[in-house]
Amino acid sequence: MPDAAETGSSPMLEIAGARATIRLNRPRHLNRLQAEDLGELLKLFDRIEADSAIRVLVLTGTGRAFSAGYDLNSVAERAVSTNEQQSAGSAFEIVVNRLEDLAVPTICRLNGGVYGGSTDLALACDFRIGVDTAEMFMPAARLGLHYYRSGIKRYVTRLGVDNAKMLFLTAQKISAPEMLRIGYLTAMVPMDLLDEEVDRLAAILGGNAPKAMAGMKRAINEFARGELDEAAADQRHRDSMRGDEIKEGIKAFAEKRPPKF
């Protein structure tokens, strides 16, 4: 087991009841994502979404950091042309956007520092619970990189213009209390309470109506991006009013018991 942890591997999927966990697993390199990990993550997302028994996803890392981001050196070494390099960069953006649009609610369990592109990967999750020793920084300006459009939009819509400018333009590292203050963290806890807090939120999300949550999550994300599909949102609302979930929800409320969706 120590050897496997040292060597590391592609992201691992664990399923326990209604909860799926994806674990980034290259601890010796602070869980830096490699080009080959991107396709694997997309496959895991598809598998999770295809399993109706899974109600919540937790994304976390092995070891002392959540993730050091995307391995840009690996991209440069593999690229034989500018177009191939752009396509490798686009692949990371596709993974992050796919995570944001996943139907099930998502929690990022920030077990440590988060850097570079992985700050956007975590931001694509619905909730981020981090340890009080966590830190983050976005080094794009220091690297001479203009970040991809959807990542900048996510920063702006979730953290606000001023915070997005501070993080992108100064490329300065910030601590967990500051991450909490600007809204990057949903909650900040000591390491010994991290699992308890993640479990508590996962249990709440896992017990709520999956179709209603998926529809409202989609609408909230579309609102934030300024691209709400009004007709689709209205249709989901109408469908929910005569669906099985609302029948069970009302019945459970009347019977003073937890609903069983």
Image (spheres, rainbow, N blue to C red):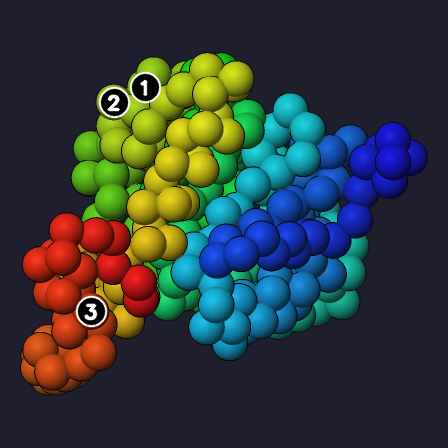
Q: Can see residue 82? A: no
Mark 1 vs 2: CB contact within 8 A: yes
Report the side of 186 relative to 95 (left or right): left
Amino acid type indicated by mark 1: Glu
Name the residue tied to disc 1: 178
How far from the left and from the top, in percent, is residue 225?
21, 61
The residue closer to the viewer here, 204 or 37, is 204
How far from the left and from the top, in percent, is residue 98?
45, 66
The mark total stands at: 3
Name the residue tied to disc 2: 181
Tell me the distance, in whole angstroms, between the alpha carbons under discs 1 and 2: 5 Å
Q: Residues within 10 Å of mark 2 (few under 14, many from 20)?
A: few
Sequence order check: which comes first, mark 3 or mark 1?
1
Q: Please identify, in this view, whether the residue under mark 3 or under mark 1 is nearer the observer.
A: 3
Amino acid type indicated by mark 3: Glu
Question: Residue 248 shows which numbered tag?
Answer: 3
Element on which disc 3 rests: helix
Q: Can see residue 6? A: yes
Element on which disc 1 rests: helix
